[in-house]
Image (spheres, helix red, strand yellow):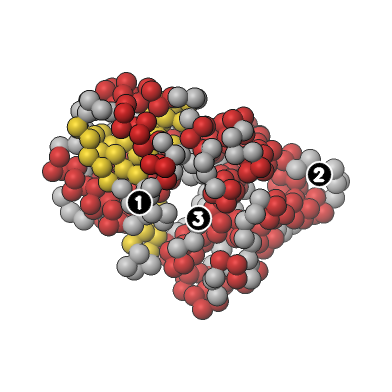
C-alpha cells in the first residue's frame, strides 16, 4: 500500500430536514453576506429554494442562478464579480456537481485579479478560496466532499478539471428527501457517474490497498441494489439515502487511499460533453463497458474477475469468462436503468472522433492510466460505442 494523506474537511449534516442546520453552519464561517448559487427553476418548484431562503432570512443574500450542466466559465466570471462587489463571506451552492463546481471556482475567483479561466487551466494559481457550503440536490459527482471542479469554455469546446484542497466544501447539507423529485434519467445518470468514479479508482495498479478495494466493491453493490429502487419508487428514503452517501464516499479520496494512477473514462467523456453537451453520467455509461472490453487482457483479467465475483456475485472459476460476464452485466445494468447506450442515441456521429481523442490525450495523463491509452485507442473505443 502506498503512503497517503487523508484529511476529512467537510462537516456533513445528513438526514431529514438537515437544511435547518444551514444557518448554524453559515455562522461558523462569518456568513453575513451570502451568495447563493443554483441552476434552473427546479429548486423553486420543489421547495428547496424556499427552505434555503427562509433559513438565511437574516443574512444579506445575493443570488446567481442559471448554472447549467457542464457549467460554463462565464458564470464563474459573473459570480466572482459579485463576490468582490458585495464583499461576500461565503457561498451556498444549492444543486449538484455543476453548481458546486461553479461555486468552488467562484470562491477562488473572488480572490484572483485576472480571468478565473486561468485557475481552471492551472490549479497551481488557486490561492485563497471563499468558504463553500453545499446543499445537495442530486447524487452523482461527490463534489460536496472533494477538491475537484470541472468547468467548460463553451465558446472553444474546452472542458477541463482543476483542483485545490481549499475547494473542499466546509460543510454539506445532505437531505435524501431533496432527491425525491429527480427525473428517473437523472437518478440513473447520477448513479452511472458514481459508479464510474469508483471504477476509476478501483481499476488501478495493484499496490496491496485491499481495504480501499473492498470499500469500493461495497459502494458499487450499493449503487446496483438501490438505483432501480429509486427509479421505481422515487420517494423511497432508504434508496435515496444510500445513493446519496455512496456518492459522497465514492469521491472524497477514501477509496483512492494507498493507490495511484490516472483516470481513463472521465477524460474521454469530458471531450464528448465539451463538443456535444450531453449529460456527463450518460456519456460515462456509454464509454465505460466499451473501455472495459477494450483494455481487458491477460495482465488485468484477474482484477476484472475480482470485480465480477465480489460485486456481481458471479460464480465462474475461469477468470476470463468471469471478467467478460461482469462487463456484460455492467452494460446491461445501465440499459435496464434506462440510460441511452450508443453514440447514435445521443446524436454523436463519427465526425469529431479524431478531434476528441486528440484533446483527451493532450489534456490528460492517459499514458499513466490503468492501461495506457493513445489517440488511436480512444478512437477505437468511440467506434465500439456506435
Q: What percent of the width, then of the height, locates residue 325?
A: 78, 53
Instruction: Find numbered disc 3 in the image and state the secondary structure of the residue it sits on.
Output: helix
Q: Is residue 98 visible in the rendered structure shown here?
A: yes
Contact, mark 1 vs mark 3 (Cβ under 8 Å): no
Location of mark 2 (residue): 314
Which numbered disc, 1 or 2, marks the residue that appears first in the sequence? 1
Q: Tell me the number on the disc at residue 67.
A: 1
Estimate the spatial distance between the alpha carbons at disc 2 and disc 3, rounded to whole Å.
29 Å
Element marked by disc 1: loop
Q: Which of the 4 image quarters holds residue 12?
A: top left
Establish if 217 lies above or below 14: below
Instruction: Kindly identify which numbered label has been placed on residue 280.
Output: 3
Category of crowding for the residue at label 1, using alpha-carbon neighbours closer than 10 angstroms: few (below 14), some (14–19), many (at least 20): many
- Sequence-first disc among 2 and 3: 3
Relative to 359, is 317 on the left or the right? right
In the rendered structure, the answer to whether residue 68 lies left or right of residue 235 reads left
- Please name the residue shown 19% across and 32% down the image: 60
Tell me the residue at 51%/78% (across/down). Answer: 351
Amino acid at each position: 500500500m502506498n503512503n497517503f494523506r487523508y484529511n476529512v474537511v467537510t462537516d456533513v449534516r445528513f438526514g431529514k430536514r438537515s437544511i435547518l442546520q444551514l444557518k448554524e453552519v453559515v455562522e461558523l464561517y462569518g456568513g453575513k453576506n451570502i451568495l447563493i448559487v443554483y441552476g434552473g427553476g427546479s429548486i423553486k418548484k420543489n421547495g428547496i429554494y424556499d427552505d434555503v431562503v427562509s433559513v438565511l432570512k437574516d443574512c444579506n443574500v445575493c443570488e446567481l442562478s442559471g448554472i447549467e450542466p457542464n457549467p460554463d466559465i462565464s458564470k464563474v466570471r459573473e459570480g466572482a464579480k459579485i463576490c468582490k462587489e458585495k464583499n461576500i463571506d461565503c457561498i451556498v451552492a444549492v444543486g449538484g456537481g455543476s453548481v458546486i463546481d461553479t461555486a468552488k471556482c467562484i470562491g477562488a475567483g473572488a480572490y484572483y485579479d485576472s480571468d478565473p479561466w486561468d485557475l481552471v487551466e492551472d490549479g497551481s494559481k488557486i490561492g485563497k478560496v471563499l468558504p463553500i457550503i453545499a446543499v445537495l440536490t442530486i447524487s452523482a459527482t461527490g463534489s460536496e466532499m472533494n477538491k475537484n471542479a470541472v468547468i467548460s469554455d463553451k465558446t472553444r469546446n474546452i472542458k477541463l478539471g482543476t483542483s485545490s484542497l481549499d475547494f473542499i466544501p466546509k460543510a454539506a447539507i445532505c437531505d435524501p428527501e431533496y432527491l425525491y423529485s429527480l427525473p428517473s434519467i437523472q437518478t440513473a445518470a447520477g448513479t452511472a457517474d458514481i459508479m464510474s468514479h469508483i471504477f476509476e479508482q478501483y481499476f488501478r495498479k495493484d499496490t496491496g490497498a485491499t481495504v480501499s478495494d473492498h470499500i469500493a466493491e461495497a459502494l458499487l453493490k450499493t449503487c446496483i441494489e438501490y438505483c432501480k429502487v429509486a427509479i421505481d419508487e422515487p420517494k423511497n428514503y432508504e434508496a435515496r439515502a444510500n445513493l446519496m452517501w455512496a456518492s459522497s464516499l465514492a469521491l472524497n479520496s477514501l477509496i483512492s487511499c494507498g493507490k495511484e494512477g490516472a483516470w481513463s473514462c472521465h477524460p474521454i467523456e469530458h471531450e464528448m460533453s465539451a463538443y456535444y453537451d450531453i449529460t456527463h453520467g450518460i456519456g460515462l455509461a456509454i464509454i465505460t463497458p466499451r473501455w472495459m472490453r477494450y483494455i481487458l487482457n491477460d495482465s488485468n483479467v484477474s482484477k476484472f474477475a475480482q470485480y465480477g465475483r465480489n460485486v456481481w456475485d458471479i460464480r465462474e472459476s475461469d477468470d476470463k469468462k468471469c471478467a467478460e460476464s461482469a462487463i456484460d452485466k455492467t452494460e446491461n445494468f445501465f440499459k435496464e436503468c434506462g440510460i441511452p447506450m450508443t453514440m447514435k442515441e445521443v446524436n454523436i456521429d463519427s465526425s469529431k472522433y479524431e478531434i476528441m481523442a486528440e484533446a483527451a490525450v493532450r489534456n490528460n495523463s492517459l499514458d499513466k492510466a490503468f492501461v495506457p491509452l493513445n489517440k488511436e485507442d480512444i478512437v477505437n473505443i468511440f467506434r465500439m460505442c456506435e
